[in-house]
Image (tube, grey):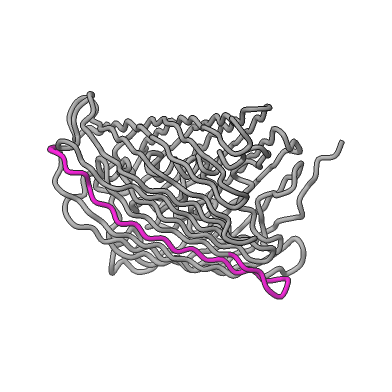
Amino acid sequence: MASVSSSVFFTLCVAASCGSGYCQANPAATAPDPYSAFALPSVGGSLRYSLTASETVLTGYNGTTGGGANAYTNFSGNVAYLSRSQRHPFSAVYSAGYLIGNSTFPSYGYQALSLSQELHTRNWDFIVGDSVSYLPQTPIGSLSGIPGSGDLSIPAVQLNTTPGLDILTTYATRVSNAASGTATRRFTPSTSISFNGADFIQRYTGSSTGFQGIDNDQQTGGATLQHRVDELTSIGGGYQFTNSSFNASYLGPGTFGFQTHSAQLFITRQLSRNLNLVAGAGPQWAVSGSNGGVTNGTSLSVAVNAALTYQAKRFGSSISYVRGINNGNGVTIGARQDSVIANITRPFARIYNVGGIVGFNHSQQLSNSLLPAYSSSGVIAGAQISAQVRQPLSVFASYTLQRQLFDGYSPAGIAFNGLTQYATFGVTYSPKALFHRN
C-alpha cells in the first residue's frame, strides 16, 4: 500500500472539494463504463456482484529465470454496494478469491474489503473509511490486485492514498489495515479547513523465500486550508505529520522508527467537462524517531502529488504521480519513492471492453545506521479485453508483466528481482445491478 504520509494531501483536496455540496463516497468515484463485465455502482441504492473463473500460465515465478512455466486456476468474486442516501452515503467494496497452483506454485486465498461513510451537516463534512486486505504479493493496481482475476479494467479502491505502485515483492502473505477520517469545516461557500488522521498497520504472515517482510505501523495527522477561486479552480495548503515504526527479528530487540513532516501547496482545476487535475508540492523532511533512530540526521526532500483524471460516458482514464518518503512496504526501513500509475478503460461495439494499466516505481532506502544501501526500479504493465457473450456472461483475455531490478542489500529477503509474465483466459458472470426499493 502506498504511504499515507506522501499522498494524504490528495485525499484532503477531494474531501474539501465536496465544499457546499455532497459528494459520493470514494469507491463510487471510479465507476467504469456500463459495458464492463463488472462495475462499481454509481447509482444510489444499487448492488453489483460478479463471479470469475480463469486459467493463468506464467513464466519467471518470483522473478526466477530458467524455471519453466507454471499454471494456476483462479476462482474470484466482487461485491460492491452504494447506499441510497445522498446526504450520508455509505459504500462497500469486497473482492476475494482462491488460487489453485500446481506442484511448484502455491495455492492461496486473498481478499480485500473497503468501507466508506460520509456524514454532512450544515457546516461540517465528515468522511471515515477503513480498508483491510490479505494478499500474497504487492497489489498491481487492479481491483483485487492479483494478476488473472479479470479486473484489470477496474482501478483499485483506495480510501486514504493516491494510487501508486509499491516496491514489488515475491510471494509473501501479508495483512494490512488502513483506517482514516477527515473532518471539513466550511467557513464560507468558498473557504474551508480540513483535519485528517489515519492509522496503517501491515503484518507479514509468511514468505516463499523463508524470510518474512518487515512489520510496520504508521500514524498520520494534519490539516489543510482550501479556498475556491472560481467554479473551476481551488487552491490551498497544509501540513502533515507522520510517525513510522518497524519490527523484525533480525533488526534486534525493540522497534525502530522515524518521523516525517510535510508542507504542501496545491491546486485543483477542472480543465474541461471531463478532465480534472489535482496537484500539490512542497518540502518534506524525515527525522529519527524517539523509539530508536532509523535515519541519519535530518533528510530533506520535495514531496509531490499529482493526478489527472478523464471520465466520459464511454471512456475513462487516469494517471497519477507520487513522490515522497514512505514506510518501505515491508522490504526496507523507510524509502524515498517516485511512483507513477495509469489506468484506462474503453468499451467499443457495445459488447467489448478494453482495459489497461501501467505502473512504475523507483525506491531508494533512507540513509540509516542499521542496514546497507538499497534501491530498486519496478514496472508493472497489463492489458485486458472482454467480450460479452450473452448477458450476464462475458469472456476475457489478459496479459500482465512484472519486472523489478534492485541494487544493494535486500533486508527482508523478499524483494522481487527479475521478470514474471502472466497470460490469462477466463469467464465472468455479472448480472445487472440490483436496486433497493422502498
Q: Is residue 263 visible?
A: yes
Q: Quadrant of the N terminus?
A: top left
The answer to which of 27 and 187 lies nearer the viewer is 187
Q: Which residue lies furthest to the bottom in this view?
A: 349
- The residue sitting at 49% across, 32% down in the picture is 179
Q: Does the magenta stretch include residue 352?
A: yes
Q: In which quarter of the image is residue 395?
A: bottom right
Q: Quadrant of residue 228?
A: top right
- The residue sitting at 59% across, 65% down in the picture is 345
Spot occupied by residue 118 in the image (x, y as percentages of width and height): 63, 33
- Prevailing secondary structure of the magenta residues: strand
Above or below, comparing residue 426 to residue 18 in the picture: below
The answer to which of 404 and 274 lies nearer the viewer is 274
Q: Residue furthest right?
A: 438
Above or below, comparing residue 221 to residue 105 in the picture: above
Q: Can residue 210 be seen in this view?
A: no
- The residue sitting at 76% across, 51% down in the picture is 433
Q: Is residue 231 magenta?
A: no
Q: In this view, does 379 lie to the left or right of 411?
A: right
Spot occupied by residue 154 in the image (x, y as percentages of width and height): 58, 57
Q: In this view, does 164 lie to the left or right of 318?
A: left
- The residue sitting at 23% across, 43% down in the picture is 300
Q: In this view, does 364 lie to the left or right of 227?
A: left
Spot occupied by residue 369 in the image (x, y as percentages of width and height): 12, 38
Q: Is residue 173 left or right of residue 410?
A: right
Above or below, comparing residue 259 to residue 344 in the picture: above
Number of labels in the image equals: 0
Q: Quadrant of the C terminus?
A: top right
Spot occupied by residue 25 in the image (x, y as percentages of width and height): 63, 41
The answer to which of 61 and 160 lies nearer the viewer is 160
Range shown magenta: 345-369
